[in-house]
Amino acid sequence: MHGRYAAGRQRANIPAKWLISEKSFREAGFCWYIWRLQAGGHRTLQVATRNCFGIQTRLCRSLAGERLVLIEAIKTGLPRAALALRRTVFFTALGAIALAVPVTHAQATKEQAALSAPETGDDASVSVPLALSKRDAELYEQIFAVQEQGRWKDADNLISRLSDDLLMGHVLAQRYLHPTAYRSRYKELKDWLALYADHPQAPRIYKLALQRRGSASYPKKPVGGYVNGAGYDYEDIRPYHHKSTKSLSSAQRSRVSVLKRRIRQRIGDGWPTGALQVLEAQETKRLFDAYELDESRTSIASGYYYFGKPDLALRHAAEAAKRSGKYLPQAHWTAGLTAWRLGKMDQAHSHFIALTKNKYASSWTRSAGAFWAARIDLAAGRFVEADKLLQMAAEYPRSFYGLLALRSLGRDDVFDWDSLALDENRANKLKLDPHGRRALALIQIGNRDEAERELRKAAASDDDKLRRAVLSLADNANFASLTMRLGGYIAQKTGEVIVNALYPVPPWAPEGGYEVDRALIYALMRQESGFNAEARSHAGARGLMQLMPATASYIGNTRYRGEKRAELYEPEINLSLGQKYVDHLLGQDGVDNGFLQLMAAYNGGIGNLGRWQKALKDNEDPLYFIESIPSRETRLFIERVMANLWMYRSRLGQDSPSLDRLAAGQWPVYQSQDLGGTGDSGLTAER
C-alpha cells in the first residue's frame, strides 16, 4: 500500500537554477514523496514530488551538475492512487521542469500555489485550488507587505489596480488594527463591520469600535462561529458520574470536599497511611457513601503500590474492586498490577479480565487489561486464550497496548493513510463558501495564519460536507493543529476515526533540518502542544515542544529571558532546541539511548528518572517499569508518545524496531529510521 520500494537506477542531471532552499520547501507545507538519491562521493540528496505523475516536481537539497542515482522512495502522505507512478514519466518530467529559488516564505507558498492547479486524469484528487488570478495574487502580496511597513499611499495605489476585492476585508483589517502606523476612526470601523462582520478579525474590530463610538449609533455585531482549540485526539472515556446517596446539608457537602482533598494531598505527599487515617475516621464514614469510600480507598491503594507497599496496595484495591469495581475500573487495574508484582497471577488475571468488560473504562484501559491478561495466559501456555485477548486488545489499534497487541499478533499495518482527498466536489464546496474561498486566496499568497482563521470560521458550520471539505484542505495544506482538532471533533461526533487527520504531518522543520527522526519529533509535538505553536503551559513551558526557558537557555547556550522568551514560539527555533534537548537526553547516563527512559526524563526530569530506576532496579520488565512510575502524568506521557511514535512510523512508511522489541518484552532503544540513518538535513542521526 505504501512504504519503501526500489525504483531502478535511472539518472538525471539537476541544473543549479532548479534548486529550492530546504527552509522554503518545508514552509510551503504540503504532502510529498521524498526520493532518496546518491551523487558523487555518496552524498545523500533528496528530490520531492508534489504530483506523483511527474507533472509538478520540486527539488530540495540537490547539488548542481551532479549525476543522481535513485535509491528508494518513501511515501509521506499522498493519495493511494499516486502509487501508480511510472518511473519513466518521473524522470522525463524531472528533466523538463525548472524552478527558481524562492527567497521568502510568501514567495515559496505562492510558487507552490502556482504549481497546484487542479488536474485531470486517473487521480480523483485535486491540488489546492486557486482563488485569485496570478496578477491579483501578486498585488495582494505586495499590499500586505507595504501596509506592514505603514506605507498607506503605496498600498492605496496597489489596491486601485485590483480586479478582485476578495481579500479587501483582510487588507482593511490589517490597516485598522496596525499597532503603530495607523489610528482608525470610528466611521471606518463601523463601515468595516457593516461589510465584513463575518471575518475572523471582527471581534477585535468591534471591541475597538465600541471604545471609539462616543454618542454615535452602535456598529454591527460580529458574526459568531469559530472552532477554537489546538489538536485534540478523541478518546472514548466514559467515566461513571456519581451522585452521593447521602442526604447532606450544604455545610456537610463542603466538609466532604475538604476530606477528599486532604486524602489526595496526603497521597501526593507520599503518605498513603495518613490518607487511610482520614478515610477510616468516624466523620468520614458518616459523610461518605459506599462508592466514595471505595473511590478514596482505590486512590490509597495506588499510593501504596507506587510507594513500594504491594501487600497493603492489594488488600485495599481488591476490597474496593469487590464492592465498587463495576464503577471503579482503577480499582481492578491497581489490584491486577499489584497481584502481578506479588506473583499472584490468577488473581491478577481475574482483575485484568474484569477491566476488559468494564463499560466505564476508557479504550486505553480496556486494551491494557486485555494485554496484561494475555501476558499471563502466554506465560501459562494458554495460547488460544492469549490469542483471543490479544485480538481484544487490538480492537483499540491506536492505543499503546493496542499497537503492542497488533505487533504481537503479527498483523500487518491496519491503518489507511490515504490523504483526505481534496476532490472536485470538496474543492467546489470551499469555493462556494465565503470563508473557504478567502482561505484559498490567503493560502495562495502565503498568509497561512489568516487562512487558518478563515478555515476555523468555516469549520464551525453545521454543514458536515463543508466541515469535511475544510478538513481535507487543512490536511492537504498541512494545517496540523486544525487538522487534528477537526479529526478529533469528527471522531467525537460520529465515531469515525480518520487517522490522517489525527496524525497530521506539520509543515515546520528545525533550523538546519532534522537530526533526530521526524517521527519522534512529531510524536512529542503531538502530545506536548497538539501542534499549536503558541501553546504555553501553566508552568511556563512554551511552543511546539513545550520547552521551559531555563531548559532552552541551557541547550541553546543563549539566555531566553524577557522579550527573548517569545522566540520559543517560533517553530523553527523551538524544534531546533527541542531536538537538541532530545539528543542531549539520549546520551545521558540512565537514558543510554532508551526510548522509555528518554520519555520519562523528558517529562519527569532526569533526576526523577534516576530515583525511579533505583526503586525498580530489580525489575527487568519494561512494561512493568512504565506502570510502576509514581507520576501518573509521566506514565501517560510515555504511553501516549510511544503510541504517537509508532503511528508516525506507520504514516512515514518506516519500520518500528522499538515496537518489535517492546512487544517481545525487551527494552526499546532509539534507532534512526529516517532515510536509512540520516535525518532530513543529511546529517547522520544514527547513534
Image (spheres, helix red, strand yellow):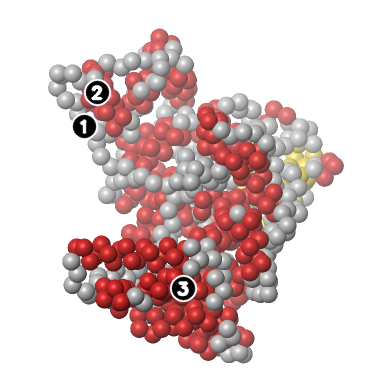
Q: Farthest residue in the top direction?
A: 153
Name the secondary structure under disc 1: loop
Q: Residues within 10 Å of mark 1 (few under 14, many from 20)?
A: some
Measured along the vertical axis of the image, is residue 83 above or below residue 366? above
Relative placement, left or right, of 89 versus 406 is: right
Count of numbered circles in the view: 3
Q: Which residue lies under the disc numbered 2?
A: 211
Q: Farthest residue in the right direction?
A: 41
Q: Is residue 635 visible?
A: yes
Residue 560, label in figure = none
Q: Is residue 157 visible?
A: no
Residue 221, label in figure = 1
**Amino acid on which the number 3 mark rests in the picture:** Thr
- Kindly check if marks 1 and 2 are in contact, taking CB atoms under 8 A apart as contact: no
**Amino acid on which the number 2 mark rests in the picture:** Gln
Cα–Cα gap, marks 2 and 3: 59 Å
Q: x, y (%) of residue 327? A: 34, 76
Front position in the image: 625 or 180: 625
**Amino acid on which the number 1 mark rests in the picture:** Lys
Q: Which residue lies under the disc numbered 3?
A: 273
Cα–Cα gap, marks 1 and 3: 58 Å
Name the secondary structure under disc 3: helix
